[in-house]
Image (spheres, rainbow, N blue to C red):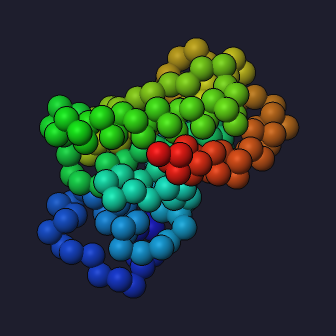
Amino acid sequence: MTSALELVDAPVEPGKLAGCELCELTAVAAATGVPALPVLSATQAQGVLAPVVLRHEKFIVILVDDPAYPGFARVIWNDHVREMSDLADEDRLLLNDAVWKVEQALREVMQPLKVNLASLGNLVPHLHWHVIPRYADDAHFPAPVWAPAASLPPPAVLDERRALLPQLAEAITRKFASR
């Protein structure tokens, strides 16, 4: 997978990265206007490009281009923080509000049966939230998206959901503009 730093010419402060892949991604997002960042998807071992749909001074929102989960979003805190309880109260409220806005936009546009919210950080101990649309016909339902796949929905269904991604990006942006 291409490193986020390889996508840009602008130098990023070396002390900000601390060997953390998400620190690298958020630093690149802040320092440049790149439209997408390389990330790992939930269901693929290789990396995918994730469009940056929102840049905030404290976090970014990306849409992970996971072929099995159109609409899968991540809210990534810019600073290297391991746990929610490490944030100041106002930052914790800000991050929660961001996750809820992304969830609302996802529900309005994608109309999933359920939305899963997950903040694991076991592999990458940098605060980030997964906002995942779930459907009765998705590859892992009702198990978590990281479980072994049970089946895949028909390609036409995935194409219909993928076609909604531009609307989802617009809806997320609107949610943050309404404040």
Residue at coordinates 39% horizontally, 85% vertically from top-left?
A: 9
Residue at coordinates 23% horizontally, 34% vertically from top-left?
A: 84
Residue 124: give x, y in percent of width and height.
29, 44
Residue 151: give x, y in percent of width and height.
69, 24
In this view, the residue in front, 154 or 88, is: 88
Above or below 109: residue 177? below
Q: Indicate left or right for 166 with 38 as reference.
A: right
Residue at coordinates 61% horizontally, 25% vertically from top-left?
A: 134
Asked if one can make out residue 18 in the rendered structure from this viewpoint, the answer is yes
In this view, the residue in front, 46 or 68, is: 68
Residue farthest front in this picture? 179
All told, the count of numbered labels is 0
**Residue 90 image-quadrant placement:** top left
Residue 10: give x, y in percent of width and height.
35, 83
**Residue 18 image-quadrant placement:** bottom left
Residue farthest top in this picture? 142
Residue at coordinates 31% horizontally, 49% vertically from top-left?
A: 77
Q: Indicate left or right for 89 with 150 as reference.
A: left
Asked if one can make out residue 41 in the rendered structure from this viewpoint, the answer is no
In this view, the residue in front, 139 or 166, is: 166
Residue 98: give x, y in percent of width and height.
42, 40
Residue farthest right in this picture? 156
Above or below 100: residue 31? below
Above or below 90: residue 7? below
